[in-house]
Structure formats: C-alpha cells, structure tokens
Image (cartoon, rainbow, N blue to C red):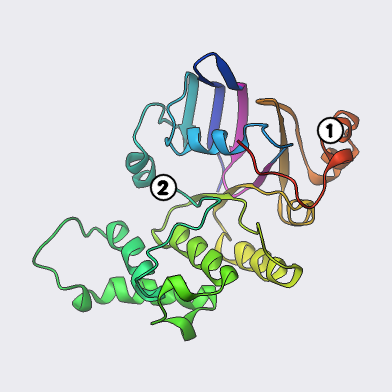
Amino acid sequence: MSGVALRLQGVQKSFGKSAIIRGVDLEVPVGERHAIIGPNGAGKSTLFNLISARFPVSTGRIELKGHDVTGLKPFEINRRGLSRSFQITNLFHNLSVFENLRCAVLWSLGYRYSFWHRLAGLRDVRRQAEQVMEELGLAKRRDTPAGILSYAEQRALEIGITIAGGADVILLDEPTAGMSNTETEDAVALIRRVTEGKTLMMVEHDMGVVFGLADRISVLVYGQIIATGTPAEIRANAEVQEAYLGTAHAGDDGDE
C-alpha cells in the first residue's frame, strides 16, 4: 500500500490566549509506525486530541487517507477508519473481556441501534471478538470482568478495543505507561503484532519502546515539531539532544 494516511497542515490549537499547538505540519505514510516524543507540556496529547477530533483545531487542516476531516466529530472520524486509545484506561469495568470486545466490534460489522438482534446470535460479531481476544492473549480471561484484570491486561484489552473495530489508522497514547520491563516487552510485541499492515501513531515516554518500534519519530517541543526522521537520525540530531533526549528520563511525560 502507498499514500499518506495522515496529513496535518498548519495545525494550531489555542485555549484562550494560550497557544498549545503552534503550527504543526506532518505526513504519516500508510503502514508506517510513527512516534511522537517530547518533554512534559509539549502538546503531545493535545495533538492526538486534535487528530481524533476530541478537540476542534483553531486553524489548519487535517486529512485522513486523502480526505479533509477537519471539523468532523469523533464518531465520524472513527467511521472513516481511525481509532485511538487514551493515557487513562477506558473500559467497561463491569463487563467481561469478551463483552468489551464485542461492543467494539458491533458497529464495524454494520450493526446499528437495533432492538431485534439478539447479541448472542450474532455469530460474525462473536467470531471477530474472539479472534481479537486470541491475538491479545486474553482467551483464558474471556469471562473475567475488565475491572479485575491486572493493569497490564487492562492496557492490552484497551489496545484490543482500539483495533477490534477494524480501523486501519491507530493512535496509541502512552500504551506502556506504568508497566514493568517484562510487561513493556510483552506490550511492544503485542503492538507490533496487532498493528501489522496498519498505520500506527503513538505517544510514548519510554525511549526504548520508541526507538525499537517506530519507523520514524517526530519531536514536539512547545507545540512545534522540531525534527522528524528515522530513529538513527533523531538520536544523532543535536537540536533534539539539547531539547529533549539529553534530559529524558524514564519518568518523563505526564503531558498537559
């Protein structure tokens, strides 16, 4: 596949008199794994909120797969093939692992608000939810309420919900935050596996994850991208070292 999955042109966001995103231009090719890094308060989560339409842009243009999506609502962006996760785990805690995934699958398979479909009888929904559950390694937790899963399992389930609807552009906001080294390794393997053939854009504080997973990296500082390149190019960039990498540490990045 070729083309541009995401294109940002002159994107700006202000809250009152405070400019948070100050003119971002960025292209993410189809199938690329692209990481956004930067110091605390750089605007990384705000940028994700603009792309996913949680916040409206102040000025500028956002394109998804060649179509202008500036000003659309979040559900309209999602229906056009973009899905995202959040820093804070966002699950139906009283529903089981399977039920959470089934909710994510329903709309993508064409089931709208309907009073005459029994969920238990929707074989295609059950099949797709179970397939995602297997990919996540959560099949043994099928009937476990999401609220009593371990933290790492909850993060894995959220990634599963993000990809279960069939979106081909995935935004992950700090997917390994709060994980141990072993859990992080498992999460990276999971992300690599479930985003194969998709476009991935992620905000991540763990530089080991970033440099090991991303095809390209963009560095956001004070609401502006100061560099974009391969991991090797970013690692060698003197401006990036001064602005961020030289002072980066494992506890970085609470963002706004």
Q: Relative to residue 33, is residue 80 drawn left or right?
A: left
Task: Residue at 76% x, 68% y: name it.
Answer: 181
Characterize the local packing of mark 1: few (<14), some (14-19) or many (20 or more) Cα atoms within 10 angstroms: many
Task: Residue at 37% x, 75% y: name it.
Answer: 96
Q: Which mark is residue 240?
A: 1
Q: Position of residue 227 (x, y in %)?
A: 76, 30
Quarter location, residue 143: bottom left
Q: Position of residue 95 (x, y in %)?
A: 34, 71
Q: Quadrant of the C terminus?
A: top right
For the record, the magenta segment spans 22-36
Under mark 1, the amino acid is Val
What count of labels does the image hold? 2
Quickly name the residue at label 2: 81
Residue 253, above or below 85: above
**SS assignment at label 2:** loop
Q: What is the chief secondary structure element of the magenta stretch?
A: strand
